[in-house]
Image (tube, grey):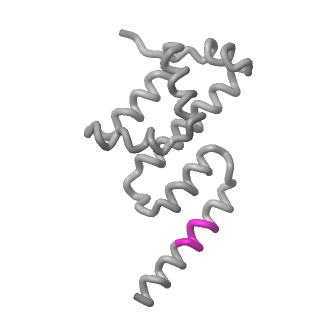
Amino acid sequence: MKFSQSQFKIIKVLKSKPAESQRRDWIELLSEEDRAFVRRFLLASGSLKELASAYGISYPTVRLRLDRLIEKIKVLEDQRFTSDFERLARARYAEGRLDKETLHELVEAHRRETEDSDDKA
């Protein structure tokens, strides 16, 4: 079976953790809109052209949406981010809802606050 570049990217993300129970975590953290996009992507056999037509948007817009979703899933799967706050902030950055400077400011402020509360405990 031959996979498109888009399908290959999704498969790569899905295979990033071997245990099935761990793989379910990221999908549960996606919004209903994100899950619907993944479902439509799969039903379209990874055809971005077909997806663009179904959504009534341009191919580059679908490509951007898919790239952002892939980055969001990578963040949600990344074990380096143990704080729910940091994972959520980084997921919002991957979606394009936060700029890089704001992300760094928020994460750094959260880390300082966490360290301060740990020092007091």
Count up the numbered dots: 0
Residue in the picture at 46% in, 48% down: 76
Residue in the picture at 43% in, 59% down: 81
- Left or right: 20 with respect to 24? left
The quadrant of the picture occupied by the N terminus is top left
| Start-end of magenta stretch | 105-110
Report which quarter residue 65 is drawn in.
top right
Residue in the picture at 54% in, 78% down: 113
Percent across and percent down for residue 13 are 41, 35
Please check the rendered image and state whether residue 107 is part of the magenta-colored stretch, yes or no. Answer: yes
Q: Main secondary structure of the magenta part?
A: helix
The quadrant of the picture occupied by the C terminus is bottom left
Compare residues 87 and 8 and report the one nearer the observer. 87
Please check the rendered image and state whether residue 28 is part of the magenta-colored stretch, yes or no. Answer: no
Q: Residue furthest right?
A: 57
Percent across and percent down for residue 67 are 58, 34
Residue in the picture at 63% in, 14% down: 49
Q: Which residue lies furthest to the left in this view?
A: 19
Q: Residue furthest front?
A: 32
